[in-house]
Image: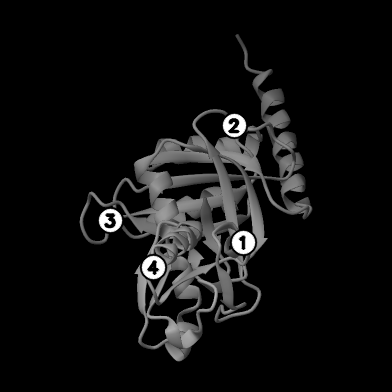
C-alpha cells in the first residue's frame, strides 16, 4: 500500500483505510522510484486520447503535463495504476478508442499496451513509500525500525499537538512523518494525528512514549513497528537509549533503599 509520496506527501486514501477501515499491522516498508508513463493501445497517438485513467495520486503528480499536453482529456479515477492499465487494455480490445492509462512502463507489457509518453511527472526524483501489511504480528526489532501510530485528542484545545510531540522530543525520538486527518465523527476541526517515528515498540523509549500517550490522550491506534527502509544510522537515538537505561538503573538503585 502506498502511504507517502515525495511530491504529493501523505497518500490520504491509504492512511484513512489503515485508520478507519481495517485492523492491519505494517510489516515492512520499501521506497521505490516512480516513473509515470502514458499507456494506450498500439498505434494510439497523443491526439487520439480523450480519456485518461489512473489513481488520483498519480494524476496529481502529472497534472501540469496533462493540462499542457491533453487539456481536453477526461481524467477518470481508477483503483490503482495496474487497474487503470488493465481496464484500458480490456476496453481497447473490445473496440473502445481514445483510452490511455497513467501507469508504470512494465504495465504496458502485462496488459498488451504501448508506451505513448515516458517520465511525465511534473517533478524529478519522484519516490513513493509503500508498506506491506498483515492482520497479525509485529516483526522483531532490528535496531533500525519505525513505529506508526494515530493519536486521537482528548479535547481540541491549545497545546494539544505540542503535548503529543513533547513525549517524543523528551526522549530524543525523531519523527519521520507527521500529518493530520479528520476523525470523520466529530465535525469540522476534529482531527487525529498520524505519526511515524524512529524506533520499535520493543524499545523501552518507544514503549514509554506509547504508555504516556495512551494515558493522556483520547486514544491511540497502533499501526505497527517494522524495519525501516534504508540503512541510516540513528546514533542520536542510540545515545538516548543509553542515557535512559542509565537513568532507569539510577531510579532502580534509589528504590532499593526504601525501608520496609
Residue drawn 47% across and 37% down?
A: 24
How far is disc 4 from disc 1 in space, using C-alphas? 19 Å
Q: Name which residue lies at 45% across and 83% down.
A: 66
Of mark 3 and mark 4, the one earlier in the sequence is 4
Q: Would you say residue 77 is visible in this rendering?
A: yes
Instruction: Identify the secondary structure beneath mark 4.
Output: loop
Image location (x, y in percent) of residue 87: 42, 60
Q: How is the image coloured?
A: one colour
Q: Which mark is residue 138?
A: 2
| Badge 1 vs badge 2, beta-carbon distance below 8 Å | no
Mark positioned earlier in the residue sequence (4 or 2): 4
Specify few, some or many for label 3: CA neighbours under 10 Å numbering under 14, 14-19, or 20 or more: some
Q: CA distance from mark 1 to mark 2?
A: 36 Å
Which element is circle 2 on? loop
Q: Where 144 falls versus 178 (above or below)?
A: above
**Circle 1 sits on which residue?**
109
Q: Which residue is mark 4?
A: 95
Say whether marks 4 and 2 touch (CB < 8 Å). no
Seen as rendered, the residue at the extreme left is 187
98 is higher (above) or lower (below) than 140: below
Amino acid at each position: 500500500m502506498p502511504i507517502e509520496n515525495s511530491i504529493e506527501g501523505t497518500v490520504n486514501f491509504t492512511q484513512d483505510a489503515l485508520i478507519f477501515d481495517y485492523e492491519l499491522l505494517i510489516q515492512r516498508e520499501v521506497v521505490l522510484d516512480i516513473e509515470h508513463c502514458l499507456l494506450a493501445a498500439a498505434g494510439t497517438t497523443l491526439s487520439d486520447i480523450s480519456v485518461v485513467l489512473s489513481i488520483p495520486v498519480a494524476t496529481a503528480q502529472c497534472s501540469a503535463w496533462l493540462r499542457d499536453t491533453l487539456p481536453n482529456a477526461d481524467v477518470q479515477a481508477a483503483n490503482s495504476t495496474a487497474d487503470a492499465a488493465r481496464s484500458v487494455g480490456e476496453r481497447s480490445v473490445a473496440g473502445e478508442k481514445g483510452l490511455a492509462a497513467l501507469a508504470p512502463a512494465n504495465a504496458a507489457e502485462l496488459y498488451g499496451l504501448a508506451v505513448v509518453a515516458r517520465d511525465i511527472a511534473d517533478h524529478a526524483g519522484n519516490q513513493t513509500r509503500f508498506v506491506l501489511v498483515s492482520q497479525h504480528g509485529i516483526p522483531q526489532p532490528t535496531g533500525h525500525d519505525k513505529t506508526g501510530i494515530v493519536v486521537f485528542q482528548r479535547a481540541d484545545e491549545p497545546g494539544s499537538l505540542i503535548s503529543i510531540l513533547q513525549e517524543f522530543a523528551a526522549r530524543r525520538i525523531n519523527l519521520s512523518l507527521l500529518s493530520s486527518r479528520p476523525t470523520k465523527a466529530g465535525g469540522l476541526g476534529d482531527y487525529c494525528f498520524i505519526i511515524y517515528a524512529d524506533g520499535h515498540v520493543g524499545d523501552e523509549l518507544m514503549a514509554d512514549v506509547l504508555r504516556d500517550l495512551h494515558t493522556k490522550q483520547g486514544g491511540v491506534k497502533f499501526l505497527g513497528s517494522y524495519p525501516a527502509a534504508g540503512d541510516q544510522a540513528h546514533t542520536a537515538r542510540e545515545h538516548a537509549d543509553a542515557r535512559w537505561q542509565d537513568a532507569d538503573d539510577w531510579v532502580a538503585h534509589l528504590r532499593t533503599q526504601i525501608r520496609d
